[in-house]
Image: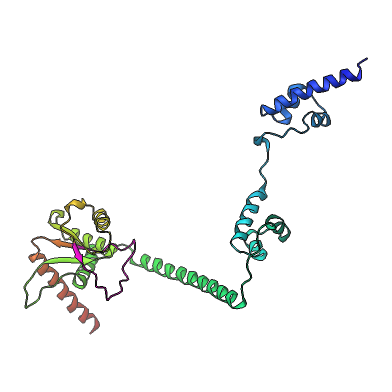
Amino acid sequence: MTSSSDKYADFETLREQAIALRRKGLSRRQIRDHIHIDNNDLLNRLLEGEPPPDWTRRPNAKDDLRARARELRLEGKTYDQIQVELGCSKSSISLWVRDLPKPERRDPSEQAKIAARKRWEHELAVRDAVRQETKQSAALEIGSMTERELLVAGTALYWAEGAKDKSYSRRENVLFVNSDPGVIRLYLAWLSLLEIAPERLAFRVMIHMTADVEGAKRYWADLVGVDPTTFQKTTIKRHNPKTVRKNVGADYRGCLVIRVSRGAELYRRIEGWWSGMVVEAQRLTA
């Protein structure tokens, strides 16, 4: 017959084994199988006071919600606003954030301003979505462009943005200046259609003195696919302190100037194409 002291000694031995296994990172099931214990109540007593290893803990789905609720409360959000964003009950929110300071109450006029601003932001977002949809739809209407269409488009583009010969100053140069990357791409595609060799093209940047000149050179060189060291000397535009410039910020890269060498013959053809387009437009509308 086993005495009570023997039972106690056996229990303490098992407890030491169970705790040692627990501290090695074993789960309850692994410990039970290792020391051959089938009784959960006994296993609970053996492991009493010994925390489980981290890997056996199940993540609490509400932990992230609680953390986010506290962030929102510190931003000054009300219970209603937190509930709308997180979709949890006000009682849970109250429990999670009750130790945080309450947001200051805004006067009715300030609340009205905030509501009006949010409505306007929503309206702007709707308008922008409509704007983008219209642009995408219009882009699809263009479809494939033929070489003749590119010839016409490039001619019109040059006549709008390129240098023109004057009767009082004969300069039959093909010189194009623009700040729009899309315009530059179309213009270069047009020159390629006209079989203008890349070696005949010279590039330089025209930019305000307060801008990032070297950054602009790298940007335009990358766009046209040349080494920025091949660029001609940059034209620096002096700033007039009496004017307020709007073309500032990281997106301002000045203008790219593209010159075609030995361009007199090409210029005459461009002017001829343009004249023909004007005549044809008049005929179509007559």
Q: Residue at the spot x=66%, y=29% of the render?
A: 25
Front in this rendered view, residue 69 or 149:
69
Q: Residue at the spot x=65%, y=61% of the render?
A: 101
The answer to whether 170 appears left or right of 43 in the picture is: left
Residue 29 is situated, as x and y percent measured from the top left of the image, at 73, 29
Residue 209 is situated, as x and y percent measured from the top left of the image, at 24, 64
The answer to whether 123 appears left or right of 253 in the picture is: right
Which color mode does the image show? Answer: rainbow
The image quarter containing residue 41 is top right
Q: Is 54 located above or below residue 87 in the figure?
A: above
Q: Residue at the spot x=18%, y=62% of the render?
A: 258
Q: Is 94 located above or below residue 111 in the figure?
A: above
Name the image quarter holding the C terminus: bottom left
The residues colored magenta run 235-257
Q: Is residue 195 visible?
A: no
Q: Is residue 214 visible?
A: yes
Front in this rendered view, residue 275 or 69:
69
Assign the magenta stretch its main secondary structure.
Answer: loop
Q: Residue at the spot x=74%, y=32% of the render?
A: 50
Residue 121 is situated, as x and y percent measured from the top left of the image, at 51, 71
Q: Is 46 located above or below residue 275 in the figure?
A: above
